[in-house]
Amino acid sequence: MATLYVGNLPWSTKAEDLASAFEQYGEVLSSRVITDRETGRSRGFGFVEVNDTDADKMIAALNGTELGGRVITVNEAKSREAGQV
């Protein structure tokens, strides 16, 4: 399983929107849009979990494309180092 980072999302993007954009290129295991704890508003990025075999194809197909009027960034998520907030 691979986790893809998706940045520069429109504020209105929901997890379902993210999943449907990626499903055209392979199997989506899960998707989530990160929200602010206090306001509940989107923070403008999210993560999509996909099969390892589909990850590179999805990055190539979607990085730099438009979603909801904004050009998104898609790349493999980097794991958070201990102590990082």
Image (cartoon, rainbow, N blue to C red):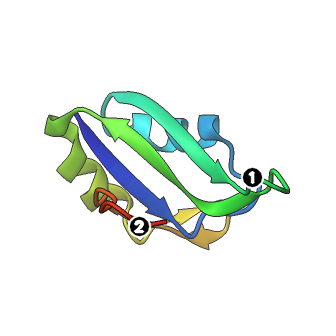
Neighbour class for label 1 at 10 Å: few (<14), some, many (≥20)? Answer: few
Question: Label 2's element?
Answer: loop
Left or right of 55 on screen, residue 5? right
Instruction: Check if mark 2's residue and mark 1's residue have beta carbons within 8 Å.
Output: no
Mark identifier at residue 37: 1
Residue under the point 41% across and 67% down: 84
Residue nearer the viewer, 21 or 5: 5
Residue nearer the viewer, 82 or 79: 82
Residue 24 in picture, x, y percent from top left:
40, 37
Residue under the point 68% across and 43% down: 14
Residue 22 in picture, x, y percent from top left:
43, 42
Rendered position, 35 above or below 11:
above
Residue 2 in picture, x, y percent from top left:
24, 41
Which amino acid type is shown beneath numbered disc 1? Arg
Rendered position, 31 above or below 3:
above
Residue under the point 28% across and 60% down: 78
Query: Sequence order check: which comes first, mark 2 or mark 1?
Result: 1
Question: Label 1's element?
Answer: loop
Residue bearing mark 2 = 84
Q: How many marks?
A: 2
Residue nearer the viewer, 82 or 43: 82
The nearer-to-camera label among 2 and 1 is 2
Q: Quadrant of the N terminus?
A: top left
Find the residue positioned furthest to the front. 83
Residue under the point 50% across and 44% down: 21
Neighbour class for label 2 at 10 Å: few (<14), some, many (≥20)? Answer: few
Which amino acid type is shown beneath numbered disc 2? Gln
Left or right of 11 on screen, residue 32? left
Residue 53 in picture, x, y percent from top left:
14, 37
Find the residue positioned furthest to the right. 39
